[in-house]
Image (cartoon, rainbow, N blue to C red):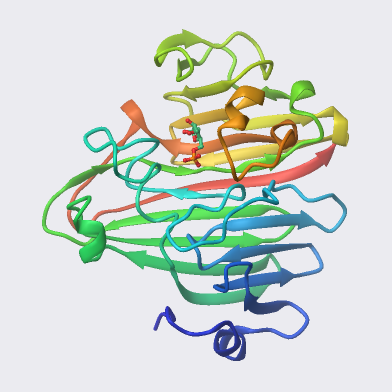
Amino acid sequence: MTYTTFTAEELNRRFGIPGRVQILADEGGLPKIRVTAPESSGEIHLHGAQVTSWQPADAEEVIFLSRCARWEEGKAIRGGIPVCFPWFRAKADDPHAPAHGLVRTKVWALESIEHDAGGVTVSMTTESDSGTRTLWPGDFRLLERATFGKELKLEFTVSNTGASSFRFEEALHTYYRVGDVRRVSIRGLDGVTYLDNTDSNKRKNQQGDVMISSPTDNAYVNTEGSLQLFDPALNRRIKIAKQNSRTTVIWNPWAEGARALSDLEEDTWQQMVCVEACNILEDAVDLAPNGNHKMAVTMAVFSL
Ligand code: TA6
């Protein structure tokens, strides 16, 4: 049974766990799940199945969320961990289609909330419908499972429920909150080929750690490696491990790019960097009928 059209109050009665899990209305009036466990706290919304907060018990908030985010139906929440599917960035054959696919602006259904020693796991689902089929022909069911514990783990499963194979792109488009992006370094991509989207997607090769000193929009391809995000201003590093993801995207709009984003508060581009577990471009996934594909990302915080 999945619960799509229930109010936050009804969902709280059904799924709430006193002292651990509360379901309440978010800034746009849609239900969100607030987790408060000994190991960490966090929030995930039915709006796009989007995580917008994860804070380990002994650390500051890890996820960036814009204070100017627009909580409107059909709008993507600026920040958090947007779920991008079945295409990434603009749709190649339709410039009018929404960026990053069809599902980060859908209202997902809450399927279950489980609580064990590892933390609290929230499962949400969505599937193809007449609306999605006007833009993309595939029949699909998506499951996102977010486990809020000492680590944050997201598992994103795509199921092909139709009679034809399809090729899709996907991303867990995580906005990490940092003290000062100009002092950040990202380790684990040395020697990896990337496509630079600020330079007509030219293929380049990464030398050493990734530093951010201008608009940055790099898709590192054919790489499944773990990364470390060093944030000296907040005196911490974030370990990011991926499963079944062959692309890593690193994005920061810098000042000039941020000016074009009305839902990103002035200068807060300095407090965020996106490090995204993906399968895009040449790493896009082909899925046969009845096939399933699960991508996952796990993050953990350590002091420097
Ligand atoms: O992940 C990087 C990126 O594709 C950039 O090209 C930029 O467009 C960013 O995503 C944000 O996209 P959005 O549609 O959320 O504004």
Q: Quadrant of the N terminus?
A: bottom left
Seen in the picture, residue 149 relative to 83 is either above or below; the reply is below
Report the residue at 56% width, 69% height from top. Answer: 122
- From the top left corner, tell me how far across and down residue 249 is, in percent: 51, 30
- From the top left corner, tell me how far across and down residue 12 is, in percent: 61, 85
Residue found farthest to the left: 163
- From the top left corner, tell me how far across and down residue 75 is, in percent: 47, 55
Q: Is residue 304 visible in the rendered structure shown here?
A: no
Q: Quadrant of residue 23?
A: bottom right
Report the residue at 52% width, 24% height from top. Answer: 217
Q: Quadrant of the C terminus?
A: top right
Seen in the picture, residue 2 relative to 51 is either above or below; the reply is below
Seen in the picture, residue 175 relative to 227 is either above or below; the reply is below
Q: Is residue 50 visible in the rendered structure shown here?
A: yes
- From the top left corner, tell me how far across and down residue 287 is, in percent: 24, 47
Judged left or right of residue 142, residue 261 is right
Judged left or right of residue 136, residue 242 is right
* Foreground residue among 185 and 191: 185
Seen in the picture, residue 107 relative to 74 is either above or below; the reply is below
Report the residue at 51% width, 39% height from top. Answer: 277
Q: Quadrant of residue 108?
A: bottom left
Total marks placed: 0
